[in-house]
Amino acid sequence: MSGTRTSGRRGAQDGAGGAAPAAVRVTFLPDGQSATAVKGTSLLDVAVEAGVAVDAPCGGQGRCGRCKVTVEGDGVAHRPSAHLSAAESEAGVALACQATLEGDAVVTVPPPRERRHRPRGHAVALPEALPLTCDWRQDPAVRMLDLDIEPPSLTDNTSDFDRLQRALLQQHDIKQIRAELPMLRRLGRDLRMANWKVKVALEMRDWVYGAYLPPRLIRVYPSVFGQRSMGAAVDLGTTSVVAYLVDFETGRVVDSESAYNKQIACGDDVISRIVYARRDGGLARLQRLAVETINELLIVLQERNRIENYEIHEVTLAGNTTMTHLLLGIDPRFLREEPYIPTISVPPGLIASELGLDANPLARVHALPCVGSYVGGDITAGVISSGLYATEKLTVFIDIGTNGEMVLGTKDWLVACACSAGPAFEGGGVGCGMRATTGAIEDVWIDSHTLEATYRTVDDAPPRGICGSGLIDLIAELFVTGVIDKGGHIRKGLATPRVRDGLGGAEYVVAWADESDDGRDVAVNESDISSLVRAKAAVYAGIALLCRSVGVALADVEQFLIGGAFGEYIDVEKAIRIGLLPDLPPERFSFLGNTSAMGAYTALVCVNSRHDVLDVAAKMTYVELSADNAFMDEYTSALFLPHTHIDAFPTVAALLAADGANGVPAKEDA
C-alpha cells in the first residue's frame, strides 16, 4: 500500500500576511505510505492521519512506551524517554508520540505483535428470543407500501406531496406524513420516473424530543425495483465495533460484521481518548475514525448482501458515554473532570447524513441513552436485552471490558456504577498480551506436579501472545499450583525451567520460542500479573460496593448476567479462583455475549423498546465510585488472590487446602 496524505495543524500567519508554515514530508516503511505535514507536528498525529498503524495504547501521552519507531536522518526531533535504552536511542529509535517533524523523514514502523484480524463474531438471536414489548410484525419501525398514484392533469392540479398523501389515505388509511427538505427536492422527479407507481419507505413511529410525530417519508422507489427495507444495529465499543444487518420484513439479522475500532490508534481506553481529544484536531479525528469504522462495516454488509446504502432505512447505535460523545463530535473532557458530568445523556434525533454514515441519508439514527459519565448506552442496551429490566429476581448485570460496568436490581429498581478496569482484560498492558485473534493463547492448564503448561490458542494457530481469557486461566492455574503467592509474586527456586529471571524480573514461560509463531517466548512477569490483579480487583470491588450501597449481601444475588464479547470466554471457576467473580454456585452465572449489540437490535426491531430503554435510563441510580472512599477500601482488599479475606472464597480455600498450595496445609497434614 502506498499513497500520500496531508496532515498537521494550521499555523498562524503574521500580521502582514506572512507565508504559511513550512510543510515537510514523511515516508513510513515498510508500506511506503507518504504524508505531508506542518513542521512541528507530532509524528504520531501524522501516522494516525495517514492511516499508519502505530501501537499507541496510551493515546500519545508517553506513558506506555509502545509507539517505538526507527527514524532515518535528522528530520525528526524527539525527547529522551525512560522507555528507550541508550542503544535504542543511538540506533535512531524514538517514541512517535514524543517526536516532532522538523524536516523530511523516513520512519520505519515495526509490525504489530498481533495481526489485524477482525474480532470474533457474535451469536445472534432471532426476534422471538428477544424480550420484546411490542408486536413488531403489526407495529414495525419502517413500512414499505405500494402506491398507485393518480397522475396530475389540468383538471387535477394537486401538488405532488399532497397527491402522495391522498393515495396513502385511500389505499393504506394513513392520514398524514412528513417529509424533510432533501426528500422534497427529489420527490417530483422520483414520482415521474416511476410513472406514479411507487413503493414508499415510511418511518412509522418517529419519536423525537418525547413525542410521536406523524410517519416520515424516507424514500420513494419505482414499484418495479423491488427494494428491501433494512436496518442496522451497531455496537460502538471501545475496542471493537459490531454491526448487524436486519431485514425489517422478517425482523431477523441477515448478516453481521465486526472490526477493531479505528480510534485504537489514539489510545486503548476511554481516558486516553478523552486526553487525545484535547489535542489540536484530536476530537475531529476521533469522530472521523468512529464513522470510518462503522461505514466500513456497513459497506461490507451491503456488498455481501447485494443491497444499496439507501435501502438501510434506520440505524440504532449503542456505545459507552465516551464513545457516544466522540461519535457525535461532542467534547468529552468533562467526563474525567470532577464532578464527571456528560454533556448529554439522551442523544437528539439524528439522521445518517448528519453523522456521515453510509446509509440512506434520511435514515433515523437512534443513539441509546446514557446514565452517567461511565455508564452509557451499551449498558442500558444490555439491561434491555438481558431481560433485567423485566425480572423479579435480584440480579447483577456486568459488562466486563476496559471499563467494567455493573447494574444491580430488579424490574422495580436499578442502581449502577462503573470502574476503570484497564486494558488487561483485552490483552493490553501486558508484555505478551494481545486481543483474542488468531494465535492468542485463550486456555491454559498447569500440571500441579511438573508445573508444565498446556494451552490452546484461537484457531489452533501457533501462539503469538495471550489474550484476556487466557490471562485469567493462567493466573488462576499459577495460583492454585503455588507458582505465585496471593500477592501475585512468582516463587523462585521451583523445580521447573519455566520460572526464570527475565528483563522485567521473575517470569513464567507459557510457550517456548520454538513453539511460537514469531520465534519468541510467550511469558508473563510479575508486572503483567499485577495488571490483571488490579483489573479484577476493580470489578470485584464495584460489585461488592454496589451490593453494600443498598444493603444486599453478595450471597443474596440470585443471578449474575455477564455481558460483553470478552465475557463469553471467561471460565467461571477460574474467574472465582482469582477473585474476579464472587464465590457462588456456578449455576447463578450466565454469559450472554454481546448484550450491547443485542440491545441495539432489540431497539431497532421493537419501537416500544426505545421507550423501555429511556425508562431504564431514567430509573437507574448512578453511583460515582471516584467520589466514594469505600470503593478504595474494597479495591485494596481485593488486590490479593483471591482476596484479603479468604473466608469469602470457601471453595478456593478448600482447593488450596486439598493441594497444600500457597501455604495452606493439605488435609492429610492439617
Image (cartoon, helix red, strand yellow):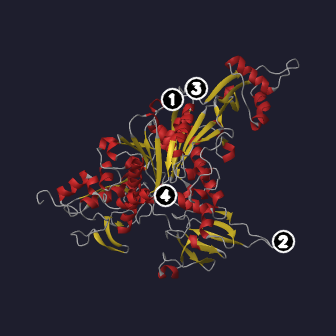
Q: Which residue type does callout 1 highlight? A: Thr
First in sequence: mark 3 vs mark 2: 2
First in sequence: mark 1 vs mark 4: 1
Cα–Cα span, label 3 and label 1: 11 Å
Q: Which residue type does callout 2 highlight? A: Gly
The reply to whether dot 4 and dot 2 touch (C-beta < 8 Å) is: no
Locate residue 287, reporting x and y percent.
63, 54
Q: Residues within 10 Å of mark 1 (few under 14, many from 20)?
A: few
State the mark number for residue 17: 2
Q: Check disc 3 and report the residue beneath it.
A: 139
Q: Check disc 4 and report the residue beneath it.
A: 626
Q: Regarding mark 4 in the picture, which secondary structure is present there?
A: helix
Q: Quadrant of residue 630?
A: bottom left
Q: Quadrant of residue 201?
A: top right
Q: Residue at x 70, y 66 (%)?
A: 9
Mark 3 vs mark 4, foreground winner is 4
Q: Is residue 118 above or below residue 306?
A: below
